[in-house]
Image: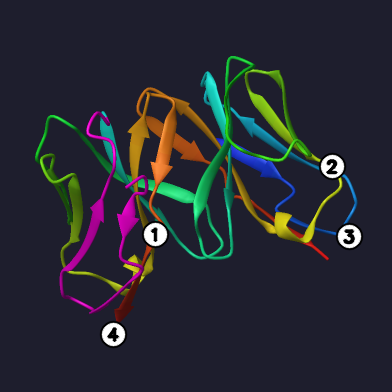
Amino acid sequence: GEDVEQSLFLSVREGDSSVINCTYTDSSSTYLYWYKQEPGAGLQLLTYIFSNMDMKQDQRLTVLLNKKDKHLSLRIADTQTGDSAIYFCAESIDNNDMRFGAGTRLTVKP
Amino acid sequence: DTAVSQTPKYLVTQMGNDKSIKCEQNLGHDTMYWYKQDSKKFLKIMFSYNNKELIINETVPNRFSPKSPDKAHLNLHINSLELGDSAVYFCASKQGYEQFFGPGTRLTVL
């Protein structure tokens, strides 16, 4: 397909791990990204992974990339209420353009 | 210091009016973008400028006209506003692999 796809909603309990999944479209994408959008705010880059990597860890965040299946995931360990937001997966296209998924709304319950 | 700033933050106007949204970045980046985020949070690229030159122009009505007076500014002018133009408009700038987003302008057309 031509869309970057993500599930729209995820609900977890505080302290649990969250896993947000994404499938992207372009096997030649150089970089894949995760952005976070809090209510009423712009998009904030959380992390990114270069296409020749299969895993990247940054504190509570772990990104896994399966290039064969064009699947990207973001794991947030010890999820906190402050992690509640919309998370966007994005792929780079032609080094200028980016294609975004529809966003996954993460709700963290106390 | 705000890296990417947009004005105004909120814009409420009547159908048929002409309005502008301004964007400025102080990062020294060469590439700037305009994105539209609709009520379902879908984020779509509208335009991309590199060094004041248009490089991406997605299927956007010609009522939308971007203007880049210099590398640090990319303004968006919209003629004859329609109800369907109501959305949040994000400006972004990019150098290398990372895009930095502005806080967004919420446009409401009545």
Query: Which residue is disc 1 drawn over?
Result: A103
Query: Which residue is disc 2 drawn over?
Result: B79
Specify the subunit that label 4 lies on.
Answer: A
As measured in the structure, the alpha-carbon distance from the residue carrying label 2 to the one carrying label 4 is: 47 Å
Q: Secondary structure at mark 1?
A: loop
Q: Residues within 10 Å of mark 4 (few under 14, many from 20)?
A: few
Q: Quadrant of the C terminus of chain B?
A: bottom right
Please determine if labels 2 and 4 lie on a single subunit: no
Q: Residues within 10 Å of mark 1 (few under 14, many from 20)?
A: many
Q: Please provide percent x and percent y for residue B27.
A: 52, 25
Which of the two residues, A50 or A40, is positioned nearer the viewer here?
Answer: A50
Amino acid beneath label 2 = Asn
Specify the subunit that label 3 lies on.
Answer: B
The region drawn magenta spans A1-29
Circle nearer the N terminus (1, 4): 1
Q: Residue drawn 64% across and 16% down?
A: B52
Q: Is residue A13 magenta?
A: yes
Specify the subunit that label 2 lies on.
Answer: B
Q: Please provide percent x and percent y for residue A55.
A: 10, 43
